[in-house]
Image (cartoon, grey):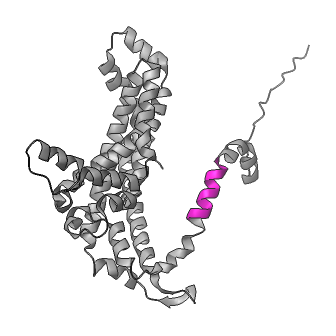
Amino acid sequence: MKTVIVQSQTPIVEKHKLSLFKKIWKNRTLLLMCMPAIIFFAIFAYLPMPGLYLAFVNYDYSLGIFNSAFVGFENFRFLVMTGDLWKLTFNTIAYNLAFIILGNFLQIGVAIMLNELTSKWFKKVSQTIMFLPHFISAVLVGLLAYNILSYDYGVLNSFLKMVGLDPVQTYSNPSIWPYIIVITFLWQSTGYGSIVYFAAIMGLDKSIIEAAEIDGANAFQRIRYIIIPWLKPTFIILLLFSLGGVLRGNFGLFYNLVGANNTMLYPTTDIIETYVFRTLMTNFNFSLGSAVSLYQSIFGFFIVITANWIVKKVSPENSLF
């Protein structure tokens, strides 16, 4: 009797790389959802990029961008030579850092407080009230501020006179305006900005919270050891996104609160946008405006790259790339 030994061979399945078209077809649903954002950035971010050449020419309306005379870095001199570039840069960065850091911490605090509320009715009413300032125009914000801070007819000075105190000359005191501007920004943006953090908290597995409660954790311990670590990736991503615009000031807020021609407040309230507006208001030149925009973009690019590199060293899983 012959024994036949059959040697079984396991077929080796090679993983072929999918072609680009197959990858697109496989992820067509996700790509379709992303299409509005892709179209937006393609039209408003990538198509206009050849216009950066405008910053290096003396723009002539009749000749167009690429036929105008090339002047190199001459357009950047108007910031360096005719304006206090470093002071403007410092003011812009300082205000934006205050907006980013204080804003994010307040937004996290508001989101946590909303999450801890047990009354659904009170929670909805609170959210609505806090969201309203975001939808108020900067023009109205400036008008409200003037009616409060005006020396002759403002609510603040009227109250001080009523109680026998001396009125405050707000619009001639540059030292108090950083506080006014930061507080106004936080009042207007905190409620709306807390939506992202509140949504992140809603994505937290409730069973983790329930297990912590069973183990005897109080509210402060749940916030410290569960909710705040859960919000860490969201905070880092929003921080990196915000740093990209750290050199771009909130022109609407500054212009309507302070104005563009109050020379007494320039030391603490003048930012790049307000300076450029004043400089180009009488003799507008597209080339000068483009040079400033390019300076802000390059500065923001290096800030984001540096911040992402630091995050990647400290917490690699939370970096953008």
**Measured from the top left, where is residue 213 in percent x and y?**
38, 12
Above or below, 6 against 315 in this view is above
The part of the image, by quadrant, that contains residue 248 is bottom left
Residue at horizontal 51%, vertical 79%? 53
Asked whether 63 falls inside the magenta stretch, the response is no
**Measured from the top left, where is residue 168 in percent x and y?**
14, 53
Residue at horizontal 67%, vertical 43%? 30
Q: Is residue 234 visible?
A: no
**Measured from the top left, where is residue 306 in percent x and y?**
36, 56
Is residue 266 found left or right of 5 in the rendered image? left
Residue at horizontal 36%, vertical 67%? 273
**Measured from the top left, where is residue 62 in percent x and y?**
57, 89
Q: Residue furthest right?
A: 1
Residue at horizontal 33%, vertical 50%? 144
Is residue 270 found left or right of 250 in the rendered image? left
Q: Is residue 212 visible?
A: yes
Q: Which residues are magenta?
A: 34-45
Above or below, 251 against 195 in this view is below
Task: Tell me the quarter of the image containing the N terminus.
Answer: top right
Q: How many labels sit on residues? A: 0
Q: Main secondary structure of the magenta part?
A: helix
Which of 268 and 145 lies nearest the eye of the viewer?
A: 145
